[in-house]
Amino acid sequence: MGGMDRRLFLLAGSALLAAPLSRAQKTYRIGWLSSGVRPARANVSYDAFMQRMGELGYVEGRTLLMEQRYGDASAELVAQRAAELVRLRVDLILATTTLATSAASKATSTIPIVMGSAANPLAAGLVSNLSRPGGNITGMTLDTADTTAKRLELLKTAIPAVRRVAALHPAEIRGFASVADWLRETESAAARLGVAFVPVDLPQRERHRWEEILGKVAADGIGAATVFETPTYLANRDTLAELCLKHRIAAVFPFREQAEAGGLMAYGADIADLYRQAAETADKILKGAKPGDIPVQQPTRFNLVVNLNTAKALGLAIPPAVLLRATSVIP
């Protein structure tokens, strides 16, 4: 082999060796779009997503750059935040809720969008089919109207004497098909159980009013509540649990972390598990898969958590039938 041929051979070989290294060192930029508030404490969803991304080989600050945007429960603000992420030309948007996913879908039809916990994306028109969503959206759904009804049934089993239950939710999201389903299923369950169902508007953006609203619930003689899924309620779980306890309202929440924060009970999908799966979906897309070819996934893990410390503070004895079904009991 001549000198020139040898140099060309070595250069070609070096290029082949460098190509995989170059790909391995590629830095991806992901936009995290939440319709809720930036949590004052640990962000369960974000932390679970980032932990799984780390396990999949991404290093924050080196091969993964995160752009976090929060909409503070404002549709207008979420839309602005979505537009910001599009202008940044992120490689992928992780949209946490139906509102966030809707805003992202209106801002871009080309950047891949992964839903973290969108409720009923079919009814919201975000995807055309769960098994083959098409377009640029896929991810995880929190389509759990039956879970909402089950939550009320568990509350009634835990407190057989309960006669009136407040359904705490923000009135501004009643227009979503998923929320209409939750309300309808909860009201139907209440009728079966012989419980009066009292919808209560607990606004996400006016958290300074929570004390007043829950005080009125208690003053009206309602000593129990079921809490609907919203990122703002999860982010402010300490405050909400403390206020329920202060006004002696026995509340059942959707997520384990809310019972750990002091809520009486929690029953619902494992939110951390949803976001770990969302990370796996994001990884597939970053490696070249098309979002429209990846099936939308539904929750597979559910938690029933009972906080006995809160039960004691409320003067309640939780029946063994509930404790035996619990995945976790907080002493």
Image (cartoon, helix red, strand yellow):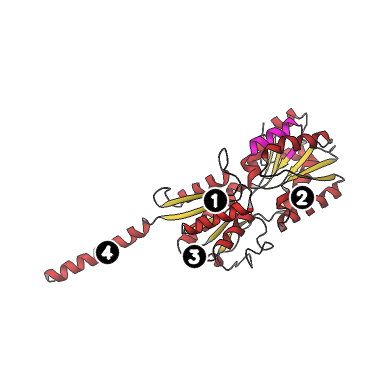
Amino acid at circle 1: Arg
What SS does tag 1 mark? Answer: helix
What SS does tag 4 mark? Answer: helix
Q: Earlier in the sequence, mark 2 or mark 3?
A: 2
Amino acid at circle 2: Ala
What SS does tag 2 mark? Answer: helix
x and y, in percent, of residue 49 in the image: 52, 49
x and y, in percent, of residue 253 in the image: 70, 42
Circle on res. 15: 4
Amino acid at circle 4: Ala
Crowd rating for badge 3 (residues with CA inside 10 Å; few <14, some 14–19, many 20+):
few
Is residue 237 highlighted in magenta? yes
Tell which of 259 and 61 is nearer to you: 61
What residue occupies the far left of the structure in this picture?
A: 3
Is residue 271 highlighted in magenta? no
Amino acid at circle 3: Ala
Circle on res. 149: 2
Marks 1 and 3, how far apart in space? Answer: 18 Å
Q: Residue at x 74, y 35 (%)?
A: 212
Q: Report which residue position mark 1 lands on.
A: 276
264 shown above or below 26 = above
Q: Earlier in the sequence, mark 2 or mark 4?
A: 4
Query: Quick check: 131 left or right of 210?
Result: left
Q: Residue at x 46, y 52 (%)?
A: 56
Q: Earlier in the sequence, mark 2 or mark 1?
A: 2
Query: Quick check: 82 left or right of 55?
Result: right
What segment carries the magenta color? 236-251
x and y, in percent, of residue 152 in the image: 78, 45
Tell which of 162 and 202 is nearer to you: 202
Quadrant where the image shows the C terminus: top right
Q: Report which residue position mark 3 lands on.
A: 289
